[in-house]
Image (spheres, helix red, strand yellow):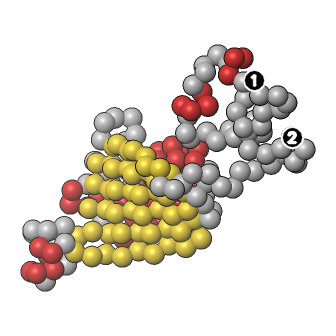
């Protein structure tokens, strides 16, 4: 038996789900349940550090009109992120060609190879990398947040809708990786 107050793990006898503490990695309740601090420390209001979660999103069937222009693509990404509460600090956009196009010296989207637009958005909360493949009607997003894990789903929906994709069908997918 442990004598006194246990500050690391609460008593699981009173829990409905004895594995709740281990199950849900996205919710860091350690500070709110006083697992990691003594009971005389002041209450922490805003969590600013949590596990860094990396989210990968693939979206097919997006609007070619939006992703064909690198400026429109950049604006769609930035505006979508701002709408869901992210603080955009800077954006960089680039257009490059796959080796097939570079070798042929073509810069149009026709012919072999694919013209790719890449947008890098630096946020107060992390960063987003977005790549568009206009002639494939496809976008890929990498979202890496330092905290605010709960905003991943909002960012996913906003980004897919921002490039004219559909979040209600099976043309998009996502997964997460714990990155640190």
In the picture provided, is 145 more to the left or to the right than 163? right
Identify the residue under disc 2. Answer: 39
Q: Element at badge 1?
A: loop
Is residue 82 visible to us here?
no
Rendered position, 20 above or below 30? above
Q: Measured along the vertical axis of the image, is residue 129 above or below residue 156?
A: below
Q: Name the residue: 36% across, 76% down.
A: 94
Decide if residue 46 is on the left or right side of residue 119: right
Mark earlier in primary sequence (1, 2): 1
Residue pointed to by mark 1:
1
Q: Residue furthest right?
A: 40
Q: Splitting the image into 4 quarters, where does residue 116 fall?
A: bottom left
> Which mark identifies residue 17?
none
Q: Residue at x 42, y 64 (%)?
A: 129
Using the image as rendered, state which of residue 23 and residue 126 is in the foreground.
23
Picture quadrant where residue 9 is located: top right
Q: Is residue 154 above or below residue 9?
A: below
Residue neighbourhood size for the residue with mark 2, other residues' Cα within 10 Å, grouped as few (<14), some (14–19), many (≥20): few
Could you tell me residue 67's position as x and y percent?
34, 62
Residue 154 position within the rendered picture, expressed as x and y whole percent measured from the top left: 53, 45
Residue 132 seen anywhere in this rendered image of the structure: yes
Side of 24 where 9 appears, left or right: right
Q: Can you say which quadrant of the picture contains the N terminus?
A: top right
Mark 1 packing: few (<14 Cα in 10 Å), some, or many (20+)?
few
Identify the residue at horizontal 28%, vertical 54% (top origin).
138
Query: What residue occupies the far bottom of the structure in this picture?
Result: 105
Foreground mark, 1 or 2, reads 1
Seen from the viewer's position, the closer of residues 159 and 146 is 146
* Residues at marks 1 and 2, CA–CA distance in whole angstroms: 20 Å
Where residue 150 appears, x then y in whole percent? 59, 44
Percent position of residue 89, x then y: 59, 71
């Amino acid at each position: 038996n442990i004598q006194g107050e246990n500050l690391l793990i609460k008593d699981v006898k009173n829990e409905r789900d004895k594995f709740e503490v281990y199950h849900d990695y996205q919710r860091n309740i350690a500070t709110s349940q006083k697992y990691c601090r003594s009971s005389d420390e002041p209450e922490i209001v805003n969590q600013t550090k949590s596990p860094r979660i990396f989210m990968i999103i693939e979206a097919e069937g997006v609007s070619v009109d939006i992703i064909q222009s690198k400026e429109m693509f950049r604006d769609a990404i930035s505006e979508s992120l701002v709408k869901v509460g992210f603080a955009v600090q800077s954006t960089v956009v680039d257009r490059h060609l796959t080796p097939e196009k570079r070798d042929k010296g073509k810069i149009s989207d026709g012919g072999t190879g694919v013209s790719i637009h890449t947008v890098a958005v630096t946020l107060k909360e992390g960063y987003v990398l977005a790549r568009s493949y206009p002639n494939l009607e496809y976008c890929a997003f990498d979202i890496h947040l330092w905290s605010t894990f709960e905003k991943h789903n909002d960012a996913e929906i906003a980004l897919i809708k921002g490039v004219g994709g559909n979040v209600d069908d099976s043309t998009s997918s996502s997964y997460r990786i714990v990155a640190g």
